Image: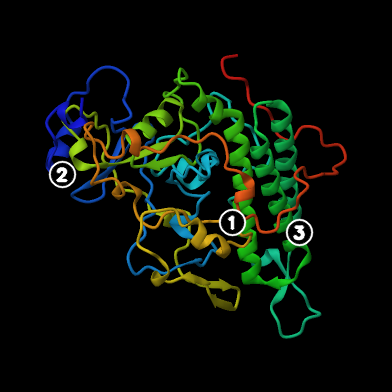
């Protein structure tokens, strides 16, 4: 039965606010219900059945110029540090650790999100992908007169090295412990580990300006988050998605999660305890929809610095502007091929040109829900043939050798679910 036929459509903000105080029906929430709800405009809303906040959603605005910001990051378009729309080519992206400024922000949450069931791998330095280095962490090379060129300090590099070693060993442990991981998936992750290791070596060995150092530092953090996301996905999330009978919607994992315009995708992620936000047509909100809170979206500036001027001590530099609006073709499609050569390690960092929910807004089917049935993207659990992906010169020897004396356990293993 179409969603809008399960009650009267709520038209306008006043009707929505009145429904907020209506008696709540008994029983568990559905994926179409609203633990939180935010209004985008007169036609579109965004809701979540399992999250207490709504993040700013990444929408390409006509005339916008893409590029880095003052913190050498991509603001709301940071693929691994901010909730993004589901992308089949990177199924593990949803499993990246959640941004601490979102899941741990007590201004917007009654209590921080935690892995209260202890099912996720525990990484020794959970803050490694999130912290910001400062001018005290940069050492100028005095042998190059008149230039602000140098390296990150030894403690910073050591911290990154330790996180990379742990991630590498955890990848090996994951592959050794799961005989169902395909050869393509194994090659994919070893290539990713190789890029991560190469990026850290570059930071350690090649003198650069503070601005270049900042860009490579952020690239290391992105790659580290992606490796951790793959580990979490293979150990925890993938088995849940692959088991249609699994249902643990009451325990939400503190992960990056997914934005989607497809209710069927939201239903799958909701039952698996993955943070999910449904961008929905206004007509899908009815008197039968549970609405617990109406909130404003949390701006990306809670974590990112959206300014374009990079300031390092007495030195300033306009952040690199990569793409002008004329570069885009104005289609709602993946822009991997348009952007892959702009990432420092030859990997895409932006995903969508326009809101994906608009892609199928003219093709709503009998369910009355955008993107149902054949329009809904399948939940990918494998990886495309790695030979079809531009890897930026990755090594052909997939398994990375790591020589670390006395290191046996890469990360603390989670408690097996159901034990």
Instruction: Between label 3 and label 1, give the one nearer the viewer.
Output: 1
> Relative to 201, is 385 above or below?
above
* Mark 1–mark 2 distance (CA, rounded to whole Å): 42 Å
Q: Earlier in the sequence, mark 3 or mark 2?
A: 2
- Confirm whether residue 127 shows in the render: no
Residue at the image point whose x is 29% and y is 33% from the top: 34
Under tag 3, what secondary structure? helix
Q: Earlier in the sequence, mark 3 or mark 1?
A: 3
Under tag 2, what secondary structure? helix
Q: Residues within 10 Å of mark 2 (few under 14, many from 20)?
A: few
Mark 2 lies on residue? 13
Mark 1 lies on residue? 347
* Mark 3–mark 2 distance (CA, rounded to whole Å): 54 Å
Residue at the image point whose x is 63% and y is 22% from the top: 415
Relative placement, left or right, of 191 versus 378 is right
> Relative to 213, is 251 above or below?
above
Instruction: Between label 3 and label 2, give the one nearer the viewer.
Output: 3
Depth check, front residue: 400 or 14:
400
Relative placement, left or right, of 264 versus 116 is left
């Amino acid at each position: 039965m179409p969603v809008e036929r399960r009650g009267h459509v709520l038209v306008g903000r006043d009707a929505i606010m009145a429904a907020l105080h209506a008696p709540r029906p008994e029983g568990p929430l559905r994926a179409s219900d609203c633990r939180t709800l935010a209004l985008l405009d007169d036609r579109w809303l965004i809701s979540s059945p399992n999250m207490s906040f709504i993040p700013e959603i990444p929408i390409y605005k006509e005339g916008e110029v893409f590029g880095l910001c003052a913190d050498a990051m991509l603001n709301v378009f940071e693929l691994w540090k901010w909730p993004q729309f589901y992308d089949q080519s990177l199924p593990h992206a949803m499993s990246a650790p959640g941004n601490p400024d979102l899941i741990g922000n007590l201004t917007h949450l009654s209590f921080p999100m935690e892995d209260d069931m202890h099912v996720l791998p525990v990484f020794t330095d959970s803050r490694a992908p999130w912290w910001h280095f400062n001018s005290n962490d940069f050492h100028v090379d005095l042998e190059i007169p008149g230039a602000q060129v140098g390296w990150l300090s030894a403690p910073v590099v050591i911290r990154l090295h330790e996180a990379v070693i742990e991630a590498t060993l955890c990848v090996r442990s994951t592959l050794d412990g799961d005989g169902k991981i395909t050869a393509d998936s194994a090659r994919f992750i070893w290539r990713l580990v190789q890029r991560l290791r190469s990026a850290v070596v570059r930071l350690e060995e090649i003198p650069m300006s503070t601005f270049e150092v900042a860009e490579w530092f952020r690239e290391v953090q992105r790659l580290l988050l992606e490796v951790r996301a793959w580990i979490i996905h293979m150990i925890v999330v993938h088995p849940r998605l692959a088991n249609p009978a699994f249902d643990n919607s009451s325990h939400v994992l503190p992960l990056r999660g997914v934005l989607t315009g497809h209710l069927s995708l939201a239903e799958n992620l909701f039952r698996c305890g993955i943070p999910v936000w449904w961008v929905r047509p206004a007509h899908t909100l009815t008197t039968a929809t549970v609405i617990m809170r109406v909130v404003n979206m949390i701006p990306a500036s809670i974590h990112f610095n959206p300014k374009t001027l990079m300031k390092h001590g007495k030195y300033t530099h306009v952040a690199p502007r990569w793409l002008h609006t004329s570069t885009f073709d104005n289609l709602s499609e993946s822009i991997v091929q348009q952007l892959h050569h702009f990432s420092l390690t030859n990997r895409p960092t932006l995903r969508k040109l326009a809101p994906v929910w608009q892609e199928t807004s003219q093709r709503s089917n009998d369910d009355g829900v955008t993107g149902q049935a054949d329009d809904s993207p399948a939940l990918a659990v494998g990886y495309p043939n790695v030979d079809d992906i531009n890897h930026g010169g990755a090594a052909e020897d997939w398994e990375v050798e790591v020589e670390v004396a006395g290191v046996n356990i890469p990360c603390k293993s989670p408690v097996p679910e159901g034990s």
